Image: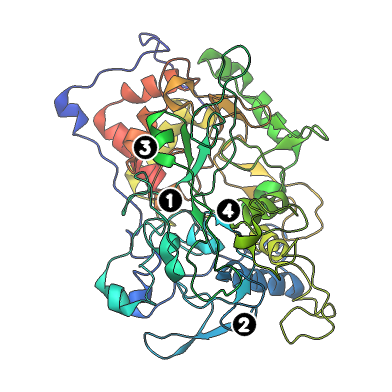
């Protein structure tokens, strides 16, 4: 790769564009549009496409085995389940793959979105979502955050599904499902991004920021669940639940909020299969070029074994298994073998017969509830089956016939230094337990390292070795079909997202300056290239 350097541009500066030039290039928008968002298709009687099964090995021709495929398919069913709040409250048999659609009276393969029939149990008293695909549904199940039509159960309120266009499911669908009495914070907008909330500093019961003996605010960084189960219809075990939501608006006023938006789960098994030595070798290969433009970068590492962690906005998680167990507990409040303690232990809100941990390896002697110990497809807990789904999804695929502008954009992407962080390709380990995963290219466009992104993107949160201004290089595969960008979803415009990489202290300043110095048609070529991914 030849790096084009622009010596007349200061590293920390951003070239000011004329008004004429600023309108000369634009983000071409979500590739394929929004027709693949959940509910937009469902309103026409079509379900969202399933996650892509990993393709045959490009060199050896190795294929996913029948048993691996069965686990993958079962993982889709589990991730699509709609969770009820008590252990006996599901509307149909746990894990039932077929439900009756009250809109058209037809039986359809689960998951149908937005789902309305609970077929699993364990939803926590505090949660952000009630099914995995609610936050991972664009452009396929397992994708990034998208839109869903509002809950069609209450026809008197919502009308048929087509009566209201797809929207952020955190705006109405999830907080009010089954009569729940949640107040929707101002940052969850009807057509805005799905946002998870972290508090930068700890607060007391009144919402005041806590300080130590030296008067310094005490760091928090944890996820604060948006919703509670208060008011849930159909669960006789929690009639006296009275827990309340955190006062999010007060924390907004105190600048004590940090947002995260969901990224796609597809291709994560391939990323997990990359060895640490490959990550470090790719970093070393471009060391001199990185140094020349002020790019450092370093791996985040596990505090236990010292190996490179690579999942999450700050590369804080080690594996898809850890991600799955954490997501079930943090996002849905479901206790499991990795996270056995409930986030909210108020017995009035957890029900009297709800065991903990709730989602565990199945021990039933029969398969009446689809939880038989002797049925290999039903043996694993939901969260473990979810991890197998992620392990065998293929990575997002680029367009097969990119335009000449997009082809030129890929060259420019490397020339100005974008590829120094967004490494186009890595290789999985030479020997893997699954032949379909071993020694194959991963076109992720990320170095999987954390970088100082300056004051403009700093979120005040530290995770592992990643400090308040550091973020993992987000993999760009699939970026052409994402709706919102950056860790907090602050923009849906790729051009704005690129420019937001530049701020005081950011390692990306020189590269963004180089981008800004390009002619308008070259900037457009890079935008076209990114939307082709």
Q: Distance between the residues labelled 1 and 4?
A: 12 Å
Decide which of 370, 42 is in the foreground and name it: 370
Q: Earlier in the sequence, mark 2 or mark 3?
A: 2
Q: Residue 194 carries which label?
A: 1
Q: Distance between the residues labelled 2 and 3?
A: 46 Å
Q: Residue at x 77, y 65 (%)?
A: 360
- The picture places residue 524, in percent across and down from the top left corner, at 29, 37
Q: Earlier in the sequence, mark 1 or mark 4?
A: 1
Q: How far apart are marks 4 and 3 (CA)?
A: 35 Å
Which residue in the structure is indicated by mark 4? Answer: 331
Residues at marks 1 and 4 touching, judged by CB atoms closer than 8 Å: no
Which residue in the structure is indicated by mark 2? Answer: 96
Number of other residues with Cα within 10 Å of mark 3, as a class: few under 14, some 14 to 19, many 20 or more: many
- The picture places residue 122, in percent across and down from the top left corner, at 64, 66
- The picture places residue 189, in percent across and down from the top left corner, at 33, 50
Q: Earlier in the sequence, mark 4 or mark 2?
A: 2
- Please tell me whether mark 4 or mark 2 is closer to you in this view: 4
- Please tell me whether mark 4 or mark 3 is closer to you in this view: 4
Q: Which residue is drawn at 31% across and 49% down?
A: 29
Number of other residues with Cα within 10 Å of mark 2, as a class: few under 14, some 14 to 19, many 20 or more: some
Secondary structure of residue under mark 4: helix
- Please tell me whether mark 1 or mark 3 is closer to you in this view: 1
Secondary structure of residue under mark 1: loop
Secondary structure of residue under mark 2: loop
Q: How many marks?
A: 4
Q: Which of marks 1 and 2 is nearer the N terminus?
A: 2
From the viewer's perspective, tell me whether residue 90 is left or right of residue 106: right
Tell me the quarter of the picture where residue 77 sits. bottom right
Which residue in the structure is indicated by mark 3? Answer: 526
Q: Is residue 159 visible?
A: no
Q: Which of marks 4 and 3 is nearer the N terminus?
A: 4
Q: Which of marks 1 and 3 is nearer the N terminus?
A: 1
């Amino acid at each position: 790769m030849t790096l084009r350097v622009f010596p007349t541009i200061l590293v920390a500066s951003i070239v000011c564009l004329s008004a004429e030039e600023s309108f000369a290039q634009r983000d071409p928008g979500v590739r394929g549009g929004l027709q693949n968002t959940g509910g937009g298709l469902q309103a026409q009687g079509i379900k969202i496409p399933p996650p892509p099964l990993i393709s045959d090995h490009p060199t050896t021709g190795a294929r996913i085995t029948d048993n691996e495929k069965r686990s993958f398919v079962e993982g889709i069913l589990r991730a699509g389940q709609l969770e009820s709040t008590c252990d006996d409250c599901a509307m149909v048999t746990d894990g039932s793959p077929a439900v009756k659609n009250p809109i058209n009276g037809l039986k359809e393969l689960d998951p149908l979105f937005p789902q309305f029939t609970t077929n699993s149990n364990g939803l926590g008293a505090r949660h952000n979502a009630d099914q995995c695909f609610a936050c991972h549904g664009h452009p396929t199940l397992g994708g990034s955050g998208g839109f869903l039509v509002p809950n069609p159960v209450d026809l008197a309120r919502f009308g048929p599904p087509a009566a209201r266009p797809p929207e952020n499911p955190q705006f109405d669908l999830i907080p009010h499902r089954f009569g729940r009495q949640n107040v929707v914070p101002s940052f969850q907008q009807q057509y805005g991004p799905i946002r998870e909330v972290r508090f930068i500093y700890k607060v007391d019961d009144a919402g005041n920021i806590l300080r130590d003996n030296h008067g310094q605010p005490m760091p928090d960084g944890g996820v604060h669940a948006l919703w509670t189960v208060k008011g849930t219809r159909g669960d006789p075990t929690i009639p006296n639940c009275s827990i309340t939501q955190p006062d999010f608006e007060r924390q907004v006023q105190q600048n004590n909020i940090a947002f995260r938006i969901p990224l796609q789960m597809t291709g994560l098994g391939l990323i997990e299969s990359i060895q640490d030595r490959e990550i470090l070798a790719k970093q070393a290969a471009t060391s001199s070029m990185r140094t020349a433009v002020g790019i450092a970068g370093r791996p985040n590492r596990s505090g236990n074994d010292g190996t490179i962690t690579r999942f999450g906005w700050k590369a804080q998680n080690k594996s898809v298994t850890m991600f799955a167990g954490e997501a079930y507990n943090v996002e849905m409040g479901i206790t499991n073998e990795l996270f056995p303690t409930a986030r909210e232990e108020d017995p009035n809100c957890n029900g009297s017969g709800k065991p903990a941990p709730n989602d565990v390896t199945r021990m039933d002697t029969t398969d009446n509830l689809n939880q038989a110990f002797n049925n290999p497809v039903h043996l694993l807990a939901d969260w473990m089956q979810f991890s197998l789904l992620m392990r065998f999804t293929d990575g997002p695929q680029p367009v097969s016939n990119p335009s000449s502008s997009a082809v030129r954009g890929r060259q420019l992407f490397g020339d100005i230094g974008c590829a120094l962080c967004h490494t186009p390709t890595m290789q999985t380990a030479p020997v893997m337990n699954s032949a379909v995963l071993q020694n194959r290219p991963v076109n992720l466009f990320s170095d999987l390292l954390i970088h100082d992104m300056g004051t403009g993107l700093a979120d005040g949160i530290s995770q592992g070795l990643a400090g308040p201004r550091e973020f993992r290089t987000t993999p760009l595969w699939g970026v052409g079909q994402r709706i919102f960008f950056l860790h907090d979803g602050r923009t849906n415009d790729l051009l704005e997202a690129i420019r937001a990489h530049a701020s005081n202290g950011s390692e990306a300043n020189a590269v963004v300056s180089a981008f800004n110095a390009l002619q308008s048609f070259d900037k457009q070529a890079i935008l076209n290239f990114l939307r082709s991914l």
